[in-house]
Every structure is written in structure tokens, then in C-alpha cells.
Image (cartoon, grey):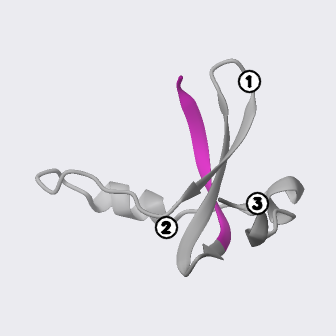
């Protein structure tokens, strides 16, 4: 399965761990929410652009904004 996701500005804390909500869809158009705690890239690359893009976020959709932390595994 392949998905394309975008970072949102919503962060939830689950069991003391902060997760940023990313939203996107599968190749077939099924909407998904991802709860990302960490992202890493190989250190032997020029990471300036990666780090700049990682700081870019958008507002979460109404659906993602309404997800209560207690519903997240």
C-alpha cells in the first residue's frame, strides 16, 4: 500500500507521547489519518530542505480536529 500524507498543525498526546496528525489518502483515494511520533532521514544527506519542509503544516480538517486523544491506540 502507498499513501500520500500532509502534516497538520494538530498534535495530540497519547500515553505521554506527542503525535502529530498527518492526513492524506491511499493510491485508490481512501482518506487516512496518521499519528506520527518521529520522522528520520539518513544523516549523510543535505537535510536543509527536508527540515524546512518538515516545519510546514496546514490546519487539520474538521474530521481530524475532532479526533479525541482517547480514541487513539
Q: Is residue 17 above or below residue 35?
A: below
Q: Is residue 28 left or right of residue 50?
A: right
Look at the image and give the residue range highlighted in magenta: 1-11
Question: What secondary structure do most residues of the magenta stretch adopt?
Answer: strand
Residue receiving disc 2: 55
Q: Is residue 31 magenta?
A: no
Residue receiving disc 1: 29
Measure the C-alpha gap from mark 1 to mark 2.
26 Å
Residue 73, given in percent of the width and then of the height, sits at 65, 59
Residue drawn at x 25%, y 57% is: 47
User: Which of the two marks, 1 or 2, is nearer to us in this view?
Assistant: 1
Residue receiving disc 3: 60
User: Which label belongs to residue 42?
Assistant: none
Q: Is residue 8 magenta?
A: yes
Measure the C-alpha gap from mark 1 to mark 3.
18 Å
Residue drawn at x 61%, y 48% is: 6
Residue 41, given in percent of the width and then of the height, sits at 27, 52
Q: Secondary structure at mark 1?
A: loop
Pointer 2: residues within 10 angstroms few (<14), some, or many (20+)? few
Q: Where, by quadrant of the figure, is residue 12 drawn? A: bottom right
Q: Secondary structure at mark 3?
A: loop
The earlier-in-sequence mark between 1 and 3 is 1
Q: Nearer the viewer, residue 15 or 48?
A: 15
Measure the C-alpha gap from mark 2 to mark 3.
15 Å
Q: Is residue 39 above or below residue 2?
A: below
The earlier-in-sequence mark between 2 and 3 is 2
Amino acid at each position: 500500500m502507498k499513501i500520500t500524507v500532509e502534516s497538520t498543525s494538530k498534535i495530540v498526546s497519547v500515553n505521554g507521547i506527542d503525535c502529530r496528525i498527518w492526513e492524506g489518502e491511499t493510491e485508490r483515494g481512501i482518506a487516512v489519518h496518521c499519528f506520527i511520533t518521529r520522522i528520520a532521514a539518513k544523516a549523510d544527506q543535505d537535510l536543509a530542505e527536508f527540515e524546512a519542509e518538515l516545519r510546514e503544516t496546514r490546519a487539520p480538517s474538521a474530521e481530524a480536529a475532532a479526533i479525541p486523544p482517547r480514541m487513539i491506540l
